[in-house]
Image: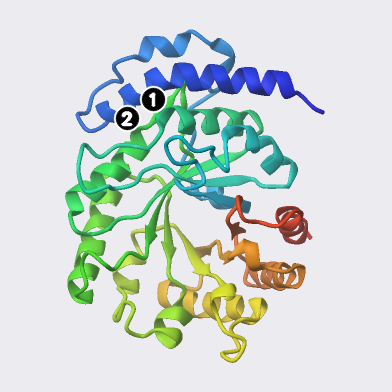
Amino acid sequence: MRRIRPVVASTVLVLGLAAVQGVGVATHALRGGEPPVRGLAALPASLQADGRAERDVDAYAGPGTWVDVYDMGAPGAPAPVTPADVDAMADAGVRTIYLQAARDRGSGRPAVVAPAVLGAFLVRAHERDMRVVGWYLPRFADVDRDLAHLEAIAAFEVFGHRFDGIAVDIEWTDDVPRHRERSERLVELSQRLREAVGDDALGAVVMPPVHLEEVNTDFWPGFPWEELAELYDVWLPMGYWTDRTTASGYRDAARYTDENLRRLRDHVGEDAAVHPIGGLAADSAPDDVAGFAAEARRHDSIGASLYDWASARPGAQLQLATALAR
């Protein structure tokens, strides 16, 4: 076994100290100004970041994996994925962890979730020369709240470590059923987020075009591709072939990935940076991953990932990383 004791010790220390620093930073982010407990960051010098992360498109490059709030466990229940899993991710060739960093419950102050755990993920991932993109699922019922959650992710910092990228998961329809109004709110949120983060690279996690245009045309009619094209730097279509039927022809991972990427670039530009998401990983066979990776490479994707780490069969992530590197 490799470095078991140092990893555990580092994680425990981060969890304990980041619980104090992370909570302060996350709640303070909405008020502006300097973090209220900055002095704490000087204590564990070995955990300090070497430098401030640049949030550019490179954060989305290469093989990735996904972790959502459910993977981090419910109160009183063991977490399926913990910061201790970062080493296994790195060993499987993962370069970027896409980590759900905020969740809107409809009340309370918008903030990141489990700041101590997020901090531990950040520190350990950066120790392994990995990137972490924080993502959030807006509900569009209250654009101010959605923006505040995303700003909390952008401001979150523990021992000098911050998220290397910020991504918006654009798929929620329940709270605003009228699609035109929902699109207007999405565009408003995206514009305000762009203003808030400046030149930081933003990722748009989107429903795949085939789903919107062929499979379920009532899901989000008139999706505002054109209005969003200049606001996001990387496009991450959720091309889950496992949700498609064999009869449709789109259960074929290669075909579904190919058509989604062709249509996506028709909407947002031929030179757009794309990072397709494949899966669901639990139901994806080796042939699925091989076809997915081949099409991702053929379309000059900057990276690709499987959803998600907790459900992936053993070897799937390493297979993806190996295929992308060819």
Label 1 and label 2: CA atoms lie apart by 6 Å
Looking at the image, which residue is at 36% across and 39% down?
153
Q: Nearer the viewer, residue 157 or 286?
A: 286
Position of residue 212 relative to residue 97, above or below, is below
Per the rendering, the mark at residue 22 is: 1
Helix, strand or loop at label 1? It is: helix
**Snapshot quadrant of residue 139:** bottom left
Residue 58 point in image, percent of width and height:
56, 48
Position of residue 28 relative to residue 289, above or below, is above
Q: How many marks?
A: 2
Position of residue 26 relative to residue 326, above or below, is above
Residue 290 point in image, percent of width and height:
74, 69
Residue 103 in the figure: left or right of residue 1: left
Circle 2 is placed at which residue position? Answer: 26
Whether residue 266 is visible here, answered yes or no, is no
Residue 285 in the figure: left or right of residue 302: right
Residue 184 in the figure: left or right of residue 285: left
Residue type of the residue flagged with mark 2? Ala
Position of residue 198 relative to residue 26, above or below, is below
Residues marked 1 and 2 touching at CB (< 8 Å): yes
Which residue appears farthest toward the right when viewing the image?
A: 1
Residue type of the residue flagged with mark 1? Gly
Looking at the image, which residue is at 67% across and 23% down?
7
Q: Nearer the viewer, residue 164 or 47?
A: 47
Helix, strand or loop at label 2? It is: helix
